[in-house]
Image (tube, rainbow, N blue to C red):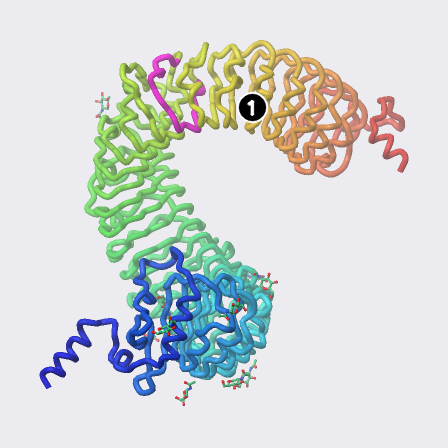
Amino acid sequence: MRLFLLYLHILLFNFPSFSLSSSNFLCHPEDSYALLQFKSSFTTYTNYACQEQPQKTSTWKNGTNCCSWHGVTCDTVSANVIGLDLGCESLQGNIYSNSTLFQLSHLQSLNLSYNDFFGTHFHSKFGGFQNLTHLDLSSCNFQGEVPPQISHLSKLISLHLSRNGQLSWKETTLKSLVQNATILEELILDETNMSSIHPNSLNLIFNQSSSLTNLNLQRSGISGNWKNNILCLPSLQELDLSKNDYLEGQLPNLSCSTFLRILDLSYCSFTGPIPLSFSNLTYLTSLSLIDNRLNGSIPSSLLTLQNLTSLSLKDNLFISGQIPDVFPKSNRFQKLDLSSNKIDGQLPKSLSNLQHLINLDLSSNSFSGQIPDVFDGLTKLQELRLGYNRLEGQIPPSLFRLSQLDYLDFSNNKLKGPLPEEISGFQNLGYLFLNNNLLSGKIPSWCLSLPSLGMLDLSNNQFTGNISVISSYSLYYLKLCSNKLQGDIPESIFNFANLATLCLSSNNLSGVVNFQHFSKLQKLDTLSLSRNSQLSLNFESTVNYNFSILSTLELSSVGLIGYSKLSSGKFPGLRYLDLSDNKLFGRLPNWLLNIDSLQSLGLSHNMFESMDQFTRNQWQNLQGLDLSFNLLAGGISLSICNKSSLILLNLAHNKLTGNIPQCLANVSSLQVLDLQENKFYGTIPNVIGELQALHGLNLSHNRLTGSIPQSIGNLSSLESLDLSSNILTGVIPAELTNLNGLEVLNLSHNHLMGEIPQGKQFNTFSNDSYVGNSGLCGFPLSKKCGPKQHSPPSANTLGSEEN
Ligand SMILES: *[C@@H]1O[C@H](CO)[C@@H](O)[C@H](O)[C@H]1NC(C)=O
Ligand SMILES: *[C@@H]1O[C@H](CO)[C@@H](O)[C@H](O)[C@H]1NC(C)=O
Ligand SMILES: *[C@@H]1O[C@H](CO)[C@@H](O)[C@H](O)[C@H]1NC(C)=O
Ligand SMILES: *[C@@H]1O[C@H](CO)[C@@H](O)[C@H](O)[C@H]1NC(C)=O
Ligand SMILES: *[C@@H]1O[C@H](CO)[C@@H](O)[C@H](O)[C@H]1NC(C)=O
Ligand SMILES: *[C@@H]1O[C@H](CO)[C@@H](O)[C@H](O)[C@H]1NC(C)=O
Ligand SMILES: *[C@@H]1O[C@H](CO)[C@@H](O)[C@H](O)[C@H]1NC(C)=O
Ligand SMILES: *[C@@H]1O[C@H](CO)[C@@H](O)[C@H](O)[C@H]1NC(C)=O
Ligand SMILES: *[C@@H]1O[C@H](CO)[C@@H](O)[C@H](O)[C@H]1NC(C)=O
Ligand SMILES: *[C@@H]1O[C@H](CO)[C@@H](O)[C@H](O)[C@H]1NC(C)=O
Ligand SMILES: *[C@@H]1O[C@H](CO)[C@@H](O)[C@H](O)[C@H]1NC(C)=O
Ligand SMILES: *[C@@H]1O[C@H](CO)[C@@H](O)[C@H](O)[C@H]1NC(C)=O
């Protein structure tokens, strides 16, 4: 007896994966053979969807009892293999009709999920497992049609076929299955292809099932207008029809499903209001209707549902009206997301009753008025988003007592007044966004010393005073730009090893800053110090410094005079550099010429005289070059024509002269070309019509002569064309009416003549587009055209005369 107990102890506890029922019996040799053959028909691969799994099949050894193998279950009486669980076994290979799997005819439970069957057809022999109750073939890479024989599995309780995107259903197959499997509870078919099933068939297919508790048809390609939108499933507890992008019609009538707990109808195309009948689903804990086209207002009975803990109505655009002020004390909401709708009015005071709330998102609506002082009871709140509304007044004091808050976004409102000097909460705050408001006063020191803060954005407010010592050591994103801050940049900022974004531009900061100090911030990606007219940047340095990952550097309007002192810097990853509005001139230094990664260079409002040095071989990836408002003279450097990656070229307001070079047509990616206010002469080259990507072309205020090339009518992307204040002659080519996207046209102050072309976009331009051309006539000018025009006919006018 003792010995037996000891034996049992060893059996039960030392081999935890053996179950008594399985291993006690010697498996049948034919089952053993079938399993070993099945195993040997596969190779294995690395499956990233699975955590590291012990390889169950590695315990499968010929000559040992297969009932003791991992993943295998045998019947306690007959010793037949009745369960096979090889989920996440990372098997790879085909399952053909001759597979020995199909010899395991007693199987009741089969899990082959997360293996790769190479797009083999889902074989009809799966329908032969007559006693199967549980079948999981999710993420198996099966292809083709689900075989009609699946409906022979009449004892199924649970069927999972998720994420077999190439597996398609016929309506008759699904209907027979649901009809025959009378005890089916779980039908999980997300990401299989049901595009052949019309939504109007759904109520027929599922009308038969009184057993279904869980139905998942997420992302199954069901599309069309669901007219008879009743789904009558009395035992249903979970329903997921989400991500069927083209499923239209009103939200379904689920009145039969009294016990529904989880309902997900998000990311479809449902229209109309939220039905009042949803408020009868008293067991509902989670309702998601994200990203549909719902309208109407939020029924107050939905907000008082006692069991509802999560409600998401985000991104419906037309849900409007106010939030009914009805939240009862008994409310259990943990998550309430009404963002990106058209809800207006004040925030309800009864929000204070939502004591279980963890996540509240009311952003991107039209809420107005003050934020009510409701936060004292909401002690569990972790995420609070009220950004992009019209909220005004002061931030209520109870907010600053929240201790669990991690994410706070009040940005883009009209909030006013100073922040409190002392606060007792925010110990766990990681993200604080108060940017784009009207906040004023000093930035209180708590704000820059929160222990967990990672991102802080106070930009675009009216904060004044000095920046105090910063001691939030986890900060990696700090934006204080566009305020009225004064004083020095605090030294403490240079200790922030994690800082990736620092924006201090557009303030009144002063003092001398050694630029080299910023290179201590080894993770710095974006640095903006522009427009602090009192700030003096000191580049003098005896050591080499390396901004290893800096990609954006904005030093506009900081009073740089020459740049030779920057010469010891290295900027190996810089892509955007703005040095505009300084006093730079002369030869470019090597550090700047050596930045191979440069994509955008802003040097406008400086004192450069020669264009050549900007167009040589450096900067092979340059996409934007702005040299406007300099003193550039002479002709356009022809080497610019080799800069084939250029998207924007701005040479406006210089003293450039000569012809507009033909070779500019080689820069085929050019989208914006601005040459206004120079001294170019000669004709506009015809090849300009080859710049197919052009959105904006400005050649105004030069001395260009000749006629407007007809080829400009080929620039099909053109939105803005300004040729004003030149000496252009001839008629306006009728081809310009082909420019369907043209929004701005200015041909004023030239010597153009004849009839203004009519039709399409040309019906939208006013007098201003044409003034100062005494020879022009026709709409929109009051001057009518005579019966005969003396202008030489263009090819097009000839063509139209023939018609
Ligand atoms: C298992 O071993 C037996 C003999 O020991 C052998 O006849 C049989 O072919 C083996 N089966 C497999 C699948 O390797
Ligand atoms: C099948 O196996 C996978 C992987 O082990 C597991 O995640 C899944 O829950 C199993 N399926 C069922 C229905 O239990
Ligand atoms: C099973 O069938 C496949 C394809 O029909 C074939 O390539 C394979 O040789 C067969 N395997 C056996 C063991 O008969
Ligand atoms: C299926 O189950 C029934 C009833 O439990 C049993 O009599 C029958 O033998 C089983 N069939 C197979 C193939 O295991
Ligand atoms: C229903 O299941 C039974 C038993 O498996 C089977 O004989 C019959 O063909 C099935 N009916 C349909 C329509 O598939
Ligand atoms: C789904 O199946 C239909 C045929 O029923 C096919 O036309 C369509 O391309 C399939 N869709 C996908 C995404 O495979
Ligand atoms: C659903 O089934 C019930 C009886 O089970 C029947 O009265 C009703 O007409 C069916 N509805 C549809 C739409 O087939
Ligand atoms: C919803 O369907 C039930 C029958 O299941 C019906 O009695 C009820 O009138 C329907 N409600 C609406 C709003 O259509
Ligand atoms: C809610 O259920 C009650 C009782 O079953 C019923 O009288 C009422 O009409 C239902 N309301 C809606 C909107 O379906
Ligand atoms: C809330 O759900 C529980 C079960 O989770 C249920 O017992 C209770 O009746 C539900 N409340 C209401 C008001 O239906
Ligand atoms: C909601 O949209 C439908 C069209 O989808 C329209 O007929 C109805 O008038 C709209 N209702 C409201 C309240 O805007
Ligand atoms: C602000 O900073 C400036 C320059 O660092 C300093 O002279 C001034 O005393 C500071 N003002 C206050 C109120 O700390």
User: Is there any visible trace of residue 328 in the rendered image?
Assistant: no
Q: Measured along the vertical axis of the image, is residue 29 above or below residue 579?
A: below
Q: Residue at x 69, y 28 (%)?
A: 689
Q: Measured along the vertical axis of the image, is residue 637 above or below residue 422?
A: above
SS class, disc 1: loop
Q: Nearer the viewer, residue 803 or 412?
A: 803
Q: Position of residue 526 (x, y in %)?
A: 37, 31
Q: Is residue 169 left or right of residue 706?
A: left
Of the 4 image quadrants, the one containing the C terminus is top right
User: Is there any visible trace of residue 78 in the rendered image?
Assistant: yes
Q: Position of residue 621 (x, y in %)?
A: 50, 28
Q: Residue at x 51, y 62 (%)?
A: 119
Q: Measured along the vertical axis of the image, is residue 717 above or below residue 542?
A: below
Q: Nearer the viewer, residue 541 or 781?
A: 541
Residue 598 occupies quadrant: top left
Is residue 574 rendered magenta in the image?
Answer: yes
Q: Which residues are magenta?
A: 563-581
Look at label 1 and name its amino acid: Lys
Disc 1 target residue: 643
Q: Residue at x 38, y 34 (%)?
A: 460
Is residue 24 rendered magenta in the image?
Answer: no
Q: Position of residue 419 (x, y in %)?
A: 27, 39
- Ligand 6 within 8 Å of the CB at mark 1: no
Q: Residue at x 23, y 46 (%)?
A: 426
Q: Is residue 758 left or right of residue 461?
A: right
Of the 4 image quadrants, the one containing the N terminus is bottom left
